[in-house]
Amino acid sequence: MSKLVKLTLAAALATALSPAVTLSSAFAAKTSLIMGMVLEPPHLDPTAGAPAAIDEIVYANVFEGLTRINDKGEVKPALAESWTISEDGLEYTFKLRSGAKFHDGTALDAGDVKFSLDRARADGSTNAQKALFADIKSVDVVDDTTVKVTLSSPAGSFLFNMGWGDAVIVAPESADGNKANPVGTGPFKFSRWAKGSALDLVRNEDYWGDKVALEKATFRFIADPAAALSAMLAGDVDAFANFPAPESIPQLEADPRFKVVIGSTEGETILSTNNAKPPFDDIRVRRAIAHAIDRKAIIDGAMFGLGTPIGTHFAPHHPAYVDLVNAYPYDPAKAKALLAEAGHGDGIKATLKLPPPSYARRGGEIIASQLREVGIDLEIIPVEWGVWVPEVFKGKDYDLTIVSHTEPMDIGIYARDDYYFNYKSEAFNATMANLNAEVNPEKRYALMMEGQKQLSQDAVNGFLFQLAKAGVWNAKINGLWENSPVQANDLTGVSWSD
């Protein structure tokens, strides 16, 4: 065979084989993911901010705590591989993972744990959930991999609290820079943030545990519901853990390219009320609002039927939930009578500040219409999160607002003296103090039930509905959470099918 024939044959074989090679590559499992998110976080430090969008990016992905909460709401080991508890319930001794490192290469040790917990509970702490650490009396380094936490009184929820995003472990060398350049111990590392557009994480090749399947994860910020739908249909994003256009769910359910999962969240969606500001400091006015709210109309109109009515600040899927929806049945005539009794027969004028989520903006229009029917005229003021957090949440400069509180088991926020509801109740505070000290599950449930009834009785807020988790993602994606027991888009178990 001549040299020319050999070369021609080799070229022909290469041409014949190239489609097979291309086909094989095309069907190889992907190792990247683009996750759509409605809200962009103000920064990336979960120990210094309340917005859920922070944890939805960094929890379990970038930062880790002593414990972690899994997709079933269970407490699992994280940076602490094990722990022992003293008989009196006051001392927790944690054994740390060997070989765990921060993303800058510094080793995790007991000193980092002490720094993190002492920082979170310090007088000048900016931690949004500082109350989680209130029971800590001292944190002591036993050795490099052992730390002892002593409580001032038994706390039945302590291990669960240590699994919140607000309790992640940070290093003193990098803590001050975590808002812009988060340095954690997790299986993903921060890579890039194009403000207003997207944020990238990459796989941490030096992770102490099992490597994740994804080499790269991108969070793309798309606030507009119509744009979110277009992005899904066009394949510009692979998933929305919390899809913002419930009206489009039937269309996506009918498309075999997608998997639609309607799960539950810890998100109590409420008409937050400034209990210290007249006329809302009058329980009769707050009860009038409760009677003026038609929850079904709000859920149908704003959420297209996705949501569970609630009558207090507690998740319906929890075994201690008390159904108090009918404590204030929809009754406009009763609402008008209560307003007249409170001296507001001629009506009330107030403001309703609405943050960006569609449940707030859409729900706010419906609620304003309902309250208008009983004589409460609301001026709707749309605000961005950059205004809502300092003005409403921190500054308490508001009459009414709508927000979904997505922190797990957060009924205790009503006992905080400086919380933005401005609710004051010695009886409720006593119930929460007893709950915090109780370790027996049945007794804890009884106290949770008592607290729910107290909040309903005082009509602290307009309790609307439990936020549903409408997840939509490519049908080939595995491992995304179907429910949200904590604020998280945990990508540690996510992979693509071939």
Image (tube, rainbow, N blue to C red):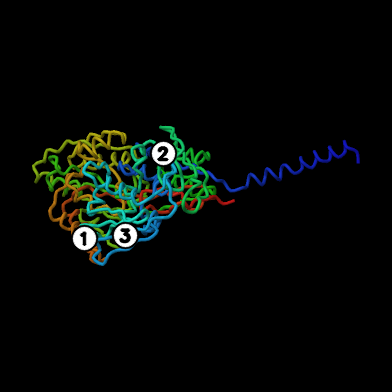
The residue at the point 32 percent across, 63 percent down is 84
Q: How many marks?
A: 3
**Left or right: residue 26 compared with residue 2:** left
Task: Identify the mark nearer the N-term, 2 or 1.
Answer: 2
Name the secondary structure under disc 1. helix
Q: Is residue 90 above or below residue 498?
A: below
Pick the residue in front: 471 or 89. Answer: 89
* Number of residues whose C-alpha sits closer than 10 Å to that of mark 3, classed few (under 14), some (14–19) or many (20 or more): many
Residue bearing the label numbered 3? 93
Q: Nearer the viewer, mark 1 or mark 3?
A: 3
Q: Which mark is residue 437?
A: 1
Give the quarter of the image for residue 280: top left
Residue bearing the label numbered 2? 225
Task: Identify the mark nearer the N-term, 1 or 3.
Answer: 3
Pick the residue in front: 438 or 371. Answer: 438
Pick the residue in front: 269 or 294. Answer: 269
Q: CA distance from mark 2 to mark 3?
A: 47 Å
Q: CA distance from mark 1 to mark 3?
A: 19 Å
Give the quarter of the image for residue 157: bottom left
Q: Amino acid at mark 2?
A: Pro
x then y, percent, for residue 286? 16, 46
Q: Which mark is residue 453?
A: none
Q: Amino acid at mark 3?
A: Thr
x then y, percent, for residue 456? 19, 54
**Left or right: residue 169 compared with residue 27:** left
Q: Are marks 1 and 3 in contact (CB under 8 Å)?
A: no
